[in-house]
Image (cartoon, helix red, strand yellow):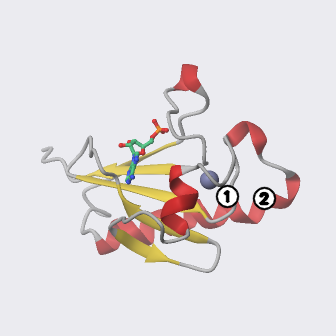
Amino acid sequence: MSEKDCIFCRIIRGEQPADFTHRGERIVAFKDIRPSAPVHILIVPRKHIRSINDLAGEDESLIAEMILLAPDLAREAGIASSGYKLLFNVEKGGGQFVFHLHLHLFGGWQRK
Ligand code: AMP
Ligand code: ZN
C-alpha cells in the first residue's frame, strides 16, 4: 500500500480526523477508533514503515522514541502506575490490519 492510500499517513497529513494525544516531530499518537481497552492509544511514526519487519538500522532511535513515549502517554492517561500493555502486531498472521507501523498502548482495566 502506498503512502497516498495509507490510513495512518492520511491521519498524519490531516486528511482524516483523529483524536490526537501527541503530535511530535517524528511521532504522533491518537486514540484507537475501536478501542479494545478503556485506554487504547496508537503510537505512530510519521515515517511510513510497513511493519517491524521493515525497520532499517537508521530507525533504531525512532523505535526507541516510540517506546519511551509510552510511559509519558500512560502517565497523562492516568494509567502508568496501574499498568498497561504495549504491543506490535506484525503482518497478517500477527494480527496487523493497518500496514503502517504502530505501537498499541492498552490499559485502564480495574484489576486488584
Ligand atoms: P493492527 O491490527 O495492529 O493493524 O491495529 C490497527 C488499529 O488501528 C486497530 O486497533 C484499529 O481499530 C485502528 N484504526 C483503524 N483505523 C483507524 C482510524 N481511522 N483512527 C484510529 N484508529 C484506527
Ligand atoms: Zn502510512
Tell me which residue sits at (37%, 72%) in the image. 21
Task: Report ligand 1 position as a quadrant.
Answer: top left
> For numbered disc 1, what is the local secondary structure?
helix
Spot the residue most to the right: 57
Is residue 102 visible in the rendered image? The answer is no
Left or right: 18 with respect to 112? right
Amino acid tagged 1: Ile
Residue 80: x percent and y percent? 32, 64
Name the quadrant containing residue 34: top left
Between marks 1 and 2, how big is the CA–CA gap?
6 Å
Q: How many marks?
A: 2
In this orientation, which residue lies closer to the viewer: 64 or 32?
32
Q: Quadrant of the image for the C terminus? A: top left
Residue 99's disc is none
Amino acid at dot 2: Asp
Rendered residue at 28%/51% (across/down): 107
The yes-or-no answer for disc 2 within 8 Å of ligand 2 is no
What residue appears at the point 52 percent right and 40 percent down from the top-left corner? 98
Tag 2 residue: 59
Q: Which image quadrant is residue 67 in? A: bottom right
For residue 63, the mark is 1
The reply to whether the C-beta atoms of the residues labelled 1 and 2 are less than 8 Å apart is: yes
Task: Indicate the position of residue 7 as horizontal and vertical percent values.
Answer: 51, 51
**Neighbours of disc 1 within 10 Å: few (<14), some (14-19), many (20+):** some
Q: Is residue 78 visible?
A: yes
